[in-house]
Each structure stands twice: as structure tokens, then as C-alpha cells.
């Protein structure tokens, strides 16, 4: 297996994390099971005790038109997909122009902006064990039950790129900070908003070291420069505790924490009982 060195303080959207060797998944039949798969780390907080990591190699970065479908490799960046669709007058992918990530990560997270989610246009995925149609996958708000690397995904090809939609998505982003973050820190609980709850317990703007719940949008945990993992974790735990004490609602992390101390069944972030 080949490896590449990734410095997470520049690679990840949080602009934080160690500089370590990451394995490359080049052949779908390679043994990847001892590794944790990453895309472009726009939804992950990588800690000093990161597990062994793997990422899809460049050979999975492609877009092909086949009949009335679009086949996209799991390592293809969202911006590349959006540009391709604009150039080829393809509709339905406009939201990807404002949603950072690689195709595999976007599908795994069922990423989206409001009601525009990647599963709306997905037909099937290809993993090392074969093809799974959308109906065979359980998915919901920012989650799926996919348990293998997504090597490729197939989408319906509809003509008609809508420029006005990219403007709408741009406006949706207007109240969100441009400071490094991983987007929403917590999932919105049913019928409420994580940002509203964080604000209601007085944590909007709370700073710990260089990390902060943004003044622009309380559910964005931002790195003001030189932020460290421990401070990010402290803020996450503080918000979970304060919101639970006040409202009885447990804020579930949307960001994925890649540090062995916070993964698995012993994670202090998993349940209000810990
Ligand atoms: C400023 C900002 C704004 C954001 N706004 C939004 C938003 O509005 N809506 C939204 O949904 N998200 C948003 N996000 C989060 C992010 O864009 C998505 O979660 C995106 O899907 C992450 O893709 P990634 O490649 O960076 O995945 P990573 O962060 O690298 O990984 C995320 C998860 O996907 C899994 N994964 C990655 N690649 C694969 C693969 N090939 N096969 C199987 N699993 C894989 C990983 O194991 C991990 O569990 C935002 C992020 C930022 C930085």
C-alpha cells in the first residue's frame, strides 16, 4: 500500500490537526478495514490520537456521462462536479457549488443545503463489494448506513443548469462565518435548531483558546487561528452539557471526531449519561 503525508492543519477545513501518513486506497480489493476512511475533511475534527487513516487515490477522481446518467468517482471534489455540470448544462447539482467535500464524503453524510440533499439525485453507489441502489441504503438527515468505501456514485442526468439556484445557495451562506470550521457542529434536533439552543444557554461567542462558537452563527465552531483539538472538545462538551441541563435535549455531533479517545462506545460525546 502507498502512503502520503497529510498536514491536517492545512488540509482540513478546521485548519487543525497533526501531520501524519495516510494510506491510499488504490485497489478496491485492498484490505482497508483497519483504517478510517477520510475524504477532504470538511466534516471532521482530527485529533492528536487519530486512528490509522486511508483516503481514495486520484484514480477515483473522475466524472463520466454514460447514457442518461452521470458516474462520479468518490474522490471527486464537489467544486469540480459543480463546474462540470455548469459547463455541460446539467441540472440538480447546483447546491454542490456551495458545499465543500469529495463525492464519497458527500454521499456518506447525505450532505445538502436545506431540502436539497445528495440523495435526491442519487441512483446507486459502487463499493468494493458491488453496487447498491438507493433503495437498498437507509438514509436520513446527514446520515446513511453505508459501511464501505464509496468508490463511485451514479446520478440521474437532467438537462438544464439553473444559475439562479447558485445565487440562492450563495444567499443561504450569507449568515455563516468564513472563519475555518467544519460547517454545523451539531445536528439540528427534531423540530429545533442547534444554533438556537446554543444561543439560548448563552454560549454564542464563547471562546476557549482560539476556538469559539461563532458570533455569526452559534452552531459553527470556528478556529480563529492556531486552535487546538482539546479546546474544540471542551466547547463541544460544554454545549452538550448546558443544553441538556437546560432543555433535556442531547446535541448530537454532526462533525466527526477522529481521535481514539473520542471514538467508539466509550466516547464521552456519545450520550448524556457519560
Ligand atoms: C464551511 C462549511 C460549510 C458546510 N456546510 C454544510 C451544509 O450546509 N450541509 C452539509 O450537509 N454539510 C456541510 N458541511 C460539511 C461538509 O461539507 C460535508 O459533510 C461533506 O460531505 C464532507 O465531505 P468530505 O469529503 O470533506 O468528508 P470527510 O469530512 O473527509 O468525511 C466525512 C465522513 O464521510 C466518510 N467518507 C468520506 N469519504 C468517503 C467515501 N469515499 N466512502 C464512504 N465514506 C466516506 C468519512 O468516513 C467520514 O465519516 C460544511 C462544511 C464546511 C467546512
Image: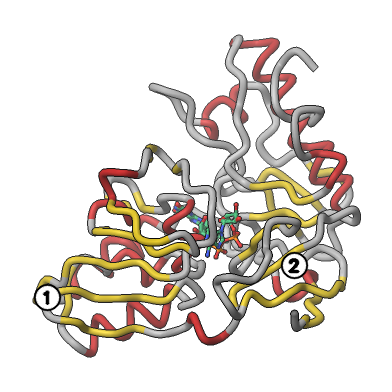
Give the numbered dot on residue 161. none
Question: Which circle, 2 or 1, is nearer the viewer?
Answer: 1
Question: Looking at the image, which is closer to me, 20 or 43?
Answer: 20
Give the numbered dot on residue 68. 1
Q: Is residue 218 left or right of residue 89?
A: right
Label 2: few (<14), some or many (≥20) within 10 Å? many
Instruction: Name the residue at the bottom extreme.
Output: 87
The C terminus: image quadrant: top right
- Residue found at x 74% / y 67%: 15
Give the SS element for disc 2: loop
- Residue found at x 81% / y 40%: 233
Q: Is residue 142 left or right of residue 2?
A: left
Image location of residue 236, percent across then percent down: 74, 36
The N terminus: image quadrant: bottom right
Question: Looking at the image, which is closer to me, 35 or 258?
Answer: 35
Label 1: few (<14), some or many (≥20) within 10 Å? few
Is 22 located above or below residue 201 in the figure? below
Image location of residue 102, percent across then percent down: 50, 70
Give the residue at mark 2.
Answer: 15
Distance from disc 2 to disc 1, alpha carbons, whole Å, reads 39 Å
Q: Is residue 206 left or right of residue 62?
A: right
Is 52 located above or below residue 138 in the figure? below
Contact (Cβ within 8 Å) of mark 2 with mark 1: no
Image location of residue 69, percent across then percent down: 18, 73
Task: Give the colouring mode of the picture.
Answer: secondary structure
Amino acid at each position: 500500500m502507498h502512503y502520503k503525508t497529510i498536514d491536517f492543519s492545512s488540509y482540513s477545513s478546521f485548519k487543525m490537526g497533526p501531520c501524519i501518513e495516510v494510506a491510499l486506497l488504490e485497489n478496491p480489493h485492498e484490505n482497508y478495514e483497519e483504517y478510517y476512511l477520510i475524504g477532504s475533511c470538511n466534516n471532521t475534527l482530527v485529533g492528536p490520537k487519530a486512528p490509522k487513516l486511508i483516503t481514495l487515490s486520484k484514480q477515483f477522481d473522475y466524472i463520466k456521462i454514460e447514457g442518461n446518467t452521470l458516474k462520479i468517482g468518490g474522490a471527486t471534489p464537489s467544486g469540480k462536479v459543480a463546474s462540470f455540470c455548469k459547463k455541460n448544462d446539467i441540472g440538480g447539482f447546483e447546491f454542490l457549488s456551495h458545499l465543500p467535500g469529495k463525492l464519497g464524503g458527500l454521499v456518506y453524510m447525505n450532505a445538502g443545503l436545506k431540502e436539497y440533499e445528495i440523495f435526491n439525485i442519487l441512483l446507486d453507489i459502487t463499493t468494493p463489494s458491488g453496487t447498491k441502489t438507493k433503495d437498498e441504503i437507509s438514509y436520513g438527515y446527514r446520515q446513511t448506513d453505508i459501511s464501505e468505501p464509496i468508490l463511485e456514485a451514479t446520478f440521474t442526468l437532467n438537462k438544464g443548469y439553473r444559475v439562479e439556484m447558485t445565487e440562492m445557495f450563495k444567499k443561504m451562506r450569507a449568515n455563516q462565518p468564513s472563519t475555518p470550521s467544519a460547517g454545523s457542529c451539531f445536528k439540528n434536533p427534531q423540530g429545533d435548531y442547534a444554533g438556537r439552543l446554543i444561543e439560548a444557554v448563552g454560549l454564542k461567542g464563547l471562546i476557549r483558546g482560539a476556538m469559539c462558537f461563532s458570533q455569526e452563527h452559534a452552531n459553527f465552531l470556528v478556529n480563529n487561528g492556531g486552535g487546538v483539538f482539546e479546546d474544540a472538545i471542551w466547547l463541544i462538551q460544554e454545549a452538550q452539557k448546558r443544553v441538556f441541563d437546560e432543555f433535556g435535549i442531547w446535541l448530537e455531533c454532526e462533525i466527526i471526531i477522529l481521535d481514539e479517545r473520542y471514538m467508539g462506545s466509550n466516547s464521552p460525546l456519545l450520550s448524556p449519561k457519560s
